[in-house]
Every structure is written in C-alpha cells, then in structure tokens.
Amino acid sequence: MGSADKIIRVIIAAIVGVLYFTGIISGTLGIVLLVLAGVFVLTSLISFCPLYAPFGLSTCAHREKK
C-alpha cells in the first residue's frame, strides 16, 4: 500500500469519526461507517489491504532492479 493511499484512508477515517461523534451521522449507518473507518485506520497501520490481494492491485511504487 502506497503512502498516498494510507494518508487518504486516515483522512477519510478522521472525517467519519468527527461526523459520528458530532452527531451528524448516527444510527445504523453511523455505526457501519465508524467500523469502516476503523478498518481504514487498521489497514493503513499494517500497510496491507486484504481486498487488493485477490484483484492483484497495488498502490505501492515499484522500484526497478538494476
């Protein structure tokens, strides 16, 4: 997972967290989005997204070998 992907996930998680704790989003939708935000933070911390593996996606820059 690339650094831009990590930063975007953390920013989205922070926005969802603020919206939930200020009461703008609530109920079942709020809880689902809060859990998703937690998953975003967790995947950013471990630098791995399980959904990228089956599709062969990578946002990490590849270095060429000389």
Image (cartoon, rainbow, N blue to C red):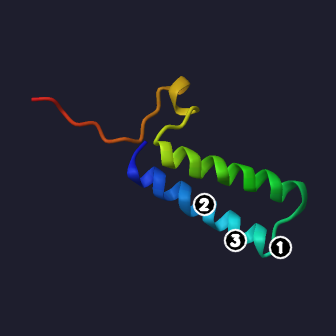
Residue 12 is marked as 2
Residue 45 lies, in percent from the top left, at 49, 48
Question: On the picture, is 46 further left or further right than 15?
Answer: left
- Looking at numbered disc 2 in the image, what kind of residue is underneath it? Ile
Residue assigned mark 1: 23
Mark 3 residue element: helix
Look at 84% across and 55% down and name the residue there.
29
In the picture of the structure, the residue carrying the numbered disc 3 is 18
Number of numbered discs on residues: 3
**Where residue 17 appears, x then y in whole percent?**
69, 65
Side of 32 relative to 17 (left or right): right
Q: Is 62 or 13 nearer to us in this picture?
A: 13
Per the image, label 1 sits on a secondary structure element best described as: loop
Do labels 1 and 3 touch, CB within 8 Å? no
**10 Å crowding of disc 1: few (<14), some (14-19), many (20+):** few
User: Which quadrant of the rendered structure holds the N terminus?
Assistant: top left
- Type of amino acid under label 3: Val
Q: Residue at x 69, y 63 (%)?
A: 16
Q: From mark 1 to mark 3, how far is it between C-alphas?
A: 8 Å
* Residue 25 percent location from the top left of the image: 82, 67
Which of 32 and 62 lies nearest the eye of the viewer? 32
